[in-house]
Image (cartoon, grey):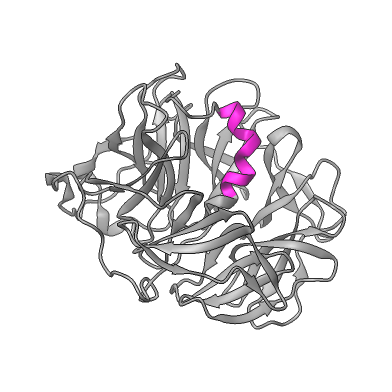
Amino acid sequence: MASGRLTPAAALCTTALVAAALAGCGSARADHVGGGTSAPTLSRPASPAATATTAQPLPAGQQGSLQQVPWTQVGPGWILAEWQPTITPGAQTSLFLVDPAGGRYLIESFPASPSASTPDVLVAWSGDGQRALLKSGDGQALALLDLRTLATATLGLGSGVAPIGFTAPNGLAIIASRSNGSGQSLERFSLTGQLELSYAASFVPGGSYNGGPVLYSPDGTELAVGTSAGIELMSNEGQGLRYLNVSPSVTSCEPVRWWNTGEVLASCAPSGSGTSQLWLVPASGAAATALTASPPASGDLGDLDAWQLPAGTYVQDAGACGYIYLAKRAADGLTSPVAMPGVPGGDSTIVLGAEGNRLAIDAKPACREGASLLWYTPATNSVTPILGGAANGGTTEDALMFGEP
């Protein structure tokens, strides 16, 4: 493993927190109110690979180069992921772009055995598909990578600042949380690291910002943040629009995704319980509806996310000791684990996102090394490997699906 990275087994204990921290992709015009409107000049000169191509995506199992990426087609169903050829400490990490069919493109390879301060850990992917945000293993250094030219720029956001992700719709700014003596605050930075806006840290009657993920509207003009009492909906300029009360039975909430054009999916902690529950919260301020049950089914230690597929509603659940698994929701709101062909029981099945009738899964072994990415189609109970494992060997590291929080 690269220096400063967690092993797949150790990473399971922080997966839920990391998944939550990656939420949020919003921005300015929307993408930039009060900020710049273009990406910074990066350190490496443009590469011939920057030329856009109109070629068709590669079929499943085939590997291509950066020059072969059909950039005009990069969008829903594409995945950006890191991969290592072996599980040996210090192995070289490579960045791949994977198309919906399962064809993969080698974008960049990072130096083997990097120092803990080398930014090589994937954090976020911009909404225009052009840039990736990377951090170092020790979390102290940040870098912006242009995926088309491989130009790189280092960023400094200041002490106590943790990046959450890019803004929406195109990723022309970075949203981050700052820890201070009195709690958490939300800030927006330009792509050169300049502070653009400090958002309000407390709301009436919504309570204080809880330091969790940020959910932007698709056009980036509004953002929802979790508070100690529910969800606060703000304009991109930081003006409070409305407090979204979830239920007297819950405390702190975190926005997860837009369930539809008018409802936010939120994960909330019921009063007196650390087991999170999913709610559908209308952006209009109307009454919220519980999506999953409380108390939950046996073994369900928290409902983290959900996706609506033709075959039903599928939920990301937390288990004991960092175990994360895919479950299916029943009519009563209770969830039951889903067994996938070829994935051993006990392995975490972390959902990256949905595309059509299938889910992109990051399968992480619990008691051995070697993670892999795959497509899972619930209607046929079938699995298609796409990176690592049965697809091309080795092990996958961090992975993001296009357009997903």
From this viewpoint, is residue 342 visible? no
Q: Please identify the quarter of the rendering in which residue 257 is found.
A: bottom right
Q: Quadrant of residue 263?
A: bottom right
Residue 12 lies within the magenta run: yes
Q: Residue at x 34, y 62 (%)?
A: 190
- Residue 125: x percent and y percent? 40, 52
Q: Is residue 398 magenta?
A: no
Residue plotted at (64% across, 58% down): 182
Residue shown at the point (60%, 78%) measured from the top left = 262
Q: Which of the two residues, 279 or 307, is positioned nearer the viewer here?
A: 279
Image quarter hosting the N terminus: top left
Report the magenta stretch's main SS. helix
Q: Which residues are magenta?
A: 8-19
Spot occupied by residue 378 in the image (x, y as percentages of width and height): 62, 48
> As drawn, which residue projects farthest toward the top?
88
| 94 left or right, relative to 160 | left
For the question of whether residue 211 can be seen, the reply is: yes
Residue sitting at x 25%, y 65% = 38
Residue closer to the observer: 161 or 332: 161
Figure check: 204 above or below 1: below
